[in-house]
Structures are given as structure tokens and as C-alpha cells.
Amino acid sequence: MPPPPAKWPSGRAPARAVESAAVHVDVKQVPVFFVLPLRQRVLRPHQSVSEVGFEGDATGTHFAAFDTSSAIVGVVSLIGEPPDEGGTPSWRLRGMATESTLQRHGVGRALITGLLDFVARSGGGALWCNARLHAVGFYELFGFVVTGEVFEEPDIGPHVRMARVVEPSLSDPSPE
């Protein structure tokens, strides 16, 4: 977990189904094997599906955005990490991917909103990710701030570490 900036932005966002101008999706918690094909196709096309698993996937929480025909059109994973010295929960967002034909149509917004809601209902805490440079503006819309220098992920491209704090909610984190 990166060291926190002097003042971390915070907040929470509720969501289940999200209607945007172009597409309606339902975000649901799913087993990890649901997220792997889209993760591979969008984020790591140079690898096979069997190679795109992340450390922590087995115990992580995974979300998929389903369109009206029940096709998975977006995915994201959330990996719980050890709390900081003060006991604050820590989470890592990984593998955010949207079908290329539906990017900029609200699918990513629905996924991140559902993920933030889950983190809030799970006690909140520090949330961080390694963002591709072209996605920095997207994450900033949700309160993330850049907390590190640009670095290169081999075969993938330039990334930067981003983080924010999610305030806790009193709601139960179990899916409906």
C-alpha cells in the first residue's frame, strides 16, 4: 500500500443498476472465473486466459457488469489487503476492463460505483490501484489521486499508482 497523501479524498457512491445515455447494466458479485476472459481480451491480449490471474484472486471479490442480454460487458476485481498500522482496512482495485465497443458508455462508471459501495459497506478504508495513464482522468472522477511516479508494466505500458479513502457505510456488504 502506498503512503497516503497529506489528505486523502473520501466519499462513497451507492449503486446496483446504472442507466447511462447509451447502455443499462447490472453489476453483480461473481466468481473469479467470470472475470478472466474479459480481463484477458481487454487488458492482456498477449497472454492466455490461464495466465491472467492475479495474486489474491482466489480470495478477492469480483464484479461483472451484465448487459440486458446477460452478457458480461465489464469486470473489476477487489483484493483485500492487510490493514495499516492503525487498523484501517486496505483494498486494491485490479483488472478493470470494459468491452471495447462499450467503453465511455457508463459500464466502467457502474463497476466502480458498485465496487465503492461494496467497500463502504465492508467498513471502508484505503483503496488503491495501478492505473494505465489513459485511465487517470476516469479514476479522478471517483476521487482517486495520483500517489506515485509513472512506471512501466512490461508488455502492458505506463501506469501510475492512485488511491483514495472510502468512508464506511452501515449497510450489510452481502450481495442482494
Image (cartoon, rainbow, N blue to C red):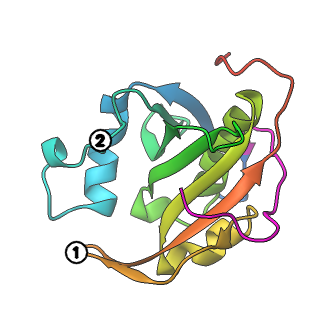
Q: In this picture, is 175 found above or below 122? A: above
* Picture coordinates of residue 123, whole percent (x, y): 75, 30
Question: Front-most of 85 and 20?
Answer: 85
Q: Is residue 113 visible?
A: no
* Picture coordinates of residue 60, whole percent (x, y): 44, 32
- Residue under the image location 70 percent in, 28 percent down: 122
Quadrant in the rendering for residue 105 = bottom right
Does residue 7 belong to the magenta stretch?
A: yes
- Residue under the image location 63 percent in, 44 percent down: 84
Does residue 15 belong to the magenta stretch?
A: yes
Q: Is residue 46 visible?
A: yes
Helix, strand or loop for disc 2: helix
Type of amino acid at the residue the image marks with label 2: Leu
Q: Which residues are magenta?
A: 1-18
Q: Are marks 2 and 1 in contact (CB under 8 Å)?
A: no
Question: Front-most of 129 and 113?
Answer: 129
Question: Horizontal placement of 157 versus 163: left or right?
Answer: left
Q: In this picture, is 51 found above or below 140? A: above
Give the residue at mark 1.
154
